[in-house]
Amino acid sequence: MTDAPSPGELSRRIDGVTAMYAQLVTRTEYTAEQRLVERRFAEVEKDVADLQRVLAEDMRAMKTSIEAAAEKRGSNMRQAVYAGVLPAVLVLLGIVVQIWIALRGA
């Protein structure tokens, strides 16, 4: 019988269990907390959906902007060809014609 706890030890253990039981959450508090958590999750899900929608709109706008910039860049390339390369080719062609005339006429 040396392994059996004494009545004083049993009393202390019962007091400990009673104190832990008093700290437990009641069912109504648990249900209210669960509702609050579900409400918060619903708000977070709504916020995430709104952010996804805004992100999709921003991505479409960025894609449109990039396409417009690419089109403008192509336009700038054509302008560079017409404004820079074409006159240079014409000047070189004029020089070649003048050299040819000078050699042929002499």
Image (spheres, rainbow, N blue to C red):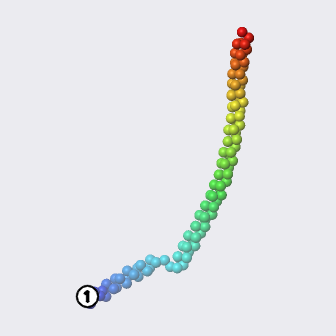
Q: Residue furthest top?
A: 106
Q: How many marks?
A: 1
Q: Quadrant of the N terminus?
A: bottom left
Q: Residue at x 70, y 43 (%)?
A: 68
Name the kind of residue labelled 1 in the image.
Thr
Q: Is residue 23 placed above or below 11 in the rendered structure?
A: above
Q: Is residue 77 placed above or below 57 in the rendered structure?
A: above
Q: Residue furthest bottom?
A: 1
Task: Kindly indicate the quadrant of the structure image that contains residue 23.
Answer: bottom left
Task: Kindly indicate the quadrant of the structure image that contains residue 45.
Answer: bottom right
Specify whether residue 6 is in view.
no
Q: Is residue 34 placed above or below 106 in the rendered structure?
A: below
Compared across the picture, whether 92 is left or right of 43 comes to right
Residue named by callout 1: 2
Q: Residue at x 69, y 24 (%)?
A: 88
Q: Is residue 84 placed above or below 11 in the rendered structure?
A: above
Compared across the picture, whether 93 is left or right of 29 comes to right
What kind of element bears circle 1?
loop
Specify whether residue 57 is in view.
yes
Q: Residue at x 63, y 55 (%)?
A: 55
